[in-house]
Amino acid sequence: MAESHSNGVETRTDIVTLTQTILSQQQQHKESTGDLTILLSSLASACKWISNVVRKAELLKVLGMTGTTNVQAENVQKLDILSNEIMINMLRGSGKTAILVSEENEEAIFIDSKLGKYCVVFDPLDGSSNIDCGVSIGTIFGIYKVNKIGNPSLADLLRPGREMVAAGYCMYGSSTVLVLTTGKEVNGYTLDPNIGEFVLTHSNIKLGPKKIYSCNEGYANTFDPAVKGYIDSLKFPSPGFQGKFTPYAARYVGSMVADVHRTLLYGGVFLYPGGKLRLLYEGFPMSMLVEAAGGKASTGRQRILDLIPDDIHARSGIFLGTASEVDEIERRYRELDASNQA
Ligand code: P6P
């Protein structure tokens, strides 16, 4: 381990940064032009900026609606609006984007140059309603390559999630962690504010083995029998080895980035039945990450990444996490459909 000693303090100097990783991935593809590298670097810069804004707002307790003023009599923008502007400006400024889709914008944003190779879909600050109580929130993003450079259209967006070339999120929690995949593996980078770099801290993430389920059971009266039966089987398991009962642990933050981050690291299953979560910039990116980490993501009847959204803000129910758990949910939906057809 390379160490340097300044004032007798041991500091590691053999760290791997996000910039190094995306540059090395670019070098691995001889036909690579470096455009995705520049785009991902711009995205990382946007996340650093949003992280700073989120932490500053929490510290100064100037959270609030547009139009209010803070202690410096500055006009305080709602954090998710400010985060949205940061994402749009940084992605437009990268010169590598043709279309942007944001949870905050009703219409897709076509970038003037039209020469960008990539479409970026994102939720700039998912879970922002939780920020007042200090719960982790985050930026979620997915990237498609345009079908034809110079002629971007909605057809570049209304396509299966499996065609995304990269996806990830940046979680603003006890630390700022950017989790990214380009399809093969999932890596996590923690922002070191002292050097302003995202440093590799979670290499090649694979879902852990923990028995955890994550669901807002406040809506249980809306769950269909497949979901109800599945959740009951976790809470009231049949006796296992030596007659021992081992119910699952329930964990639910109510912020998708936090719930998915825990699921990626520890394992378990995240369930959001019904149509609240958005497909393009929540379901697809999280499903790409979970699959690359060895898990599965399904509507209960279909792989999420095989869906084709009919609208840029289309919604879908989602079950994601440990493959065997998602398999069990799909089995219960097959049973339900068979009984309904009988
Ligand atoms: P509920 C946050 O508002 C969000 O969009 C996701 O981050 C989160 O998973 C979900 O909604 C929580 O929804 O209905 O449980 O509050």
Image (cartoon, rainbow, N blue to C red):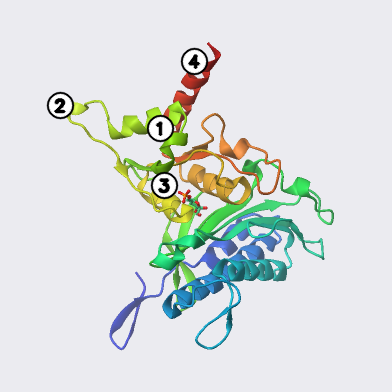
Q: Which of 57 and 206 is in front in this view?
A: 57
Disc 2 is placed on an element classified as helix
| Residue pointed to by mark 3 | 206
Structural crowding at the residue carrying mark 2, measured as other residues with C-alpha within 10 Å and reported as few (<14), some (14–19) or many (≥20): few
- Expressed as whole percent of the image width and height from the top left, the position of residue 77 reads 59, 74
Q: Identify which residue is drawn at 39% across, 41% down.
A: 217
Structural crowding at the residue carrying mark 3, measured as other residues with C-alpha within 10 Å and reported as few (<14), some (14–19) or many (≥20): many
As displayed, is residue 251 above or below residue 90? above
Structural crowding at the residue carrying mark 1, measured as other residues with C-alpha within 10 Å and reported as few (<14), some (14–19) or many (≥20): few
Q: Which of marks 2 and 4 is nearer the N terminus?
A: 2
Q: Which amino acid does label 2 sit on?
A: Gln
- Disc 1 versus disc 3: nearer the observer: 1
Q: Does the residue labelled 1 lie within 8 Å of ligand 1?
A: no
Q: Which of marks 3 and 2 is nearer the N terminus?
A: 3
- Disc 2 versus disc 4: nearer the observer: 4
Disc 4 is placed on an element classified as helix
Q: How far apart are marks 3 and 4 (CA)?
A: 36 Å
- Expressed as whole percent of the image width and height from the top left, the position of residue 161 reads 63, 43
Q: What residue type is labelled 1?
A: Ser
Residue most toward the top? 342
Q: Identify which residue is drawn at 71% across, 40% down.
A: 310
Q: What residue type is labelled 3?
A: Lys
Q: Earlier in the sequence, mark 4 or mark 1?
A: 1
| Residue pointed to by mark 1 | 324
Residue 225 found in image quarter:
top left
Residue 145 tag number: none
- Expressed as whole percent of the image width and height from the top left, the position of residue 122 reads 61, 57
Q: Does the residue labelled 3 lie within 8 Å of ligand 1?
A: no
Disc 1 is placed on an element classified as helix
Q: Identify which residue is drawn at 78% across, 63% down.
A: 111
| Residue pointed to by mark 2 | 242
